[in-house]
Image: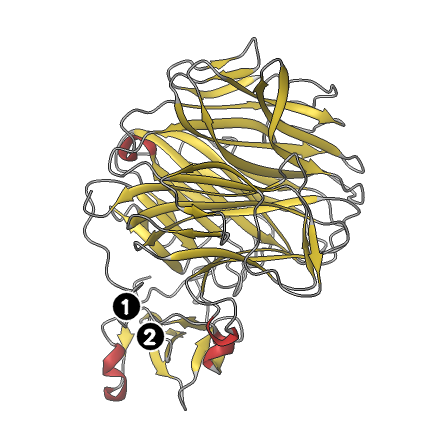
Amino acid sequence: MKLILACAALLCVSCAYEFDCPTDVHGDCIERRYAHPDCSYYFRCYDDPSGCIAIVIPCQDDLHFSPKYQECIHPYHANCTDSTTTSTTQFTPPPVEDVSAFSAARSYDWYGGDAIVYFDQVDVNLRECFKNGTTFVPGREGVYFMSFSGGIPSRTPVHIKIRPTNWPNYPSTIYRESTTAEDINMMYRTFLAGMSDTDYLNYKSFEPMESGESLQASFAGFSLTDMFHEVKAFYVAREEPFEFNQRIPMSRIFMDIEDNYNKTGREFIAPETGIYYFFFGAGQQSGKTNRVALQTWDEEFPKTEAELWMNSDSHNGLEMASRSTILRLTAGERAWVTAVEGPVESMVDHCQVYFGGFWYNPAHATTIAFAVHRTSPWQSAMPLDPVEFHEVGVNQGNAFNHAANVVIIPKSGYYYIELSIGSMPHTTLDVEILLNGNPETPENLGERIAHVSVESTNHTGVATSGRGLITHLWQNDILRLRANGLSGIFSDLNKQTTWMGLLLYEDYY
């Protein structure tokens, strides 16, 4: 319900900001505190005869509000970024043309059930396509890319679905039956969908979900039709298990614009020379390990461009994982997904085995794309800041500075940023994407724009996690990764860890 914003005269400085208080599945007000654009205030929602009401309350003694701790604490520990003041990264972006993109996250836990998940933090919402914190409404026919994630509580199965209007079993599910994880895990998935002007998408999580300060629950997407000169994209999946160590045959084709996926050859054939974004995933049978790789030809031998390695056998039910990468291909070059080791699991309702991608040819931006890989593992009690990357796969526009292991933004605009990352056996994963700041200055490490974490250590082998988001960045902004101490990153020459990004829409292009 739309709030009535009640502010005392003392609080008038913050009365310009509206807030929609969320309600639970029964329509009752969720009475708690929520972040305000000004770090020194917060919203407090409570049930009132007139509805679910929000008031603005100030913090005392120069403290900042922390959604995680639900109280005002020291600014350093609150890690809050004030979006009401002017700085080099806080100017209002210029108006955009008629394009659709959004990026949202949730700052508190979800109780599960059949209700639609509400996102209280919407950082990007071009064309106002993300409605009421719950629903993506494209408004016109086109092809849309989506990325979503969730935090999975300990000993809990997973069933997260991005549900389109007319396709209840569309393959857009994060699904896990295993309950062996003794702490929080983070899982993500990406997909493509063709949508009409009357379609819409909702995020549902039928099981409880963790999402606090790390914003584990996220939902983001953009229109390929709006952003690119031409749409050349495909999305295929498998509806049953596969037992053989060879190219995986995909039994269901959800999308193949321009007919570039060869079902007989089990491969994608590049229609143009250029930059391509690929995503793929696989399911894991109970107690069994597997490895799945995205491959191309290196002269006469297959070459692994990225690998999804699920090397743990400690799970007591089905598992799944996903990852992505960006490649430069010549016209006619082929790419495919191979089961390198072990059986892979897939089901009709979830399509855990899948493969998709698109040609990156921006219509409203300079071509800027990067994909960098680690080729060795790391584990330490001390932080690694910045995280080092050993191989540069794509660096169109020279955004990635290999000497410094940072991304220096060459053009202001809206970027899609993604991290696919492997975790070490019996070790947590704790990696942040930081904006600006200084790794040598603890009180100014930078603004955290994304966090990938696996707190569970009950995995006997390598696991995979990640996150994708859309964010506006200014020219000369600096992005880097920080791996916090007492955690680990796995990667080898087969590239299980990749950091990547694309400029979607450039300011003043």
Q: Left or right: 131 with respect to 114?
A: left
Q: Left or right: 105 with respect to 101?
A: right
Amino acid residing under circle 1: Glu
Q: Quadrant of residue 354?
A: top right
Residue depth check, mark 2 versus mark 1: number of the one nearer the observer: 2
Tell me the residue at 59%/19% (across/down). Answer: 298
Q: Where 173 falls versus 379 (above or below)?
A: above
Q: Is residue 39 visible?
A: yes
Tell me the residue at 28%/38% (across/down). Answer: 366
At label 2, counting other C-alpha atoms closer than 10 Å, the crowd grade (few under 14, some 14-19, many 20 or more) is: some
Q: Nearer the viewer, residue 96 or 116?
A: 96
Q: Which residue carries the number 1 mark?
A: 18
Q: Secondary structure at mark 2?
A: loop
Image quadrant containing the N terminus:
bottom left
Q: Nearer the viewer, residue 306 or 83?
A: 306
Amino acid residing under circle 2: Asp
The disc at residue 346 is: none
Q: Where 485 falls versus 116 (above or below)?
A: below
Tell me the residue at 74%/57% (across/down). Answer: 182
The disc at residue 38 is: 2
Tell me the residue at 49%/47% (across/down). Answer: 402
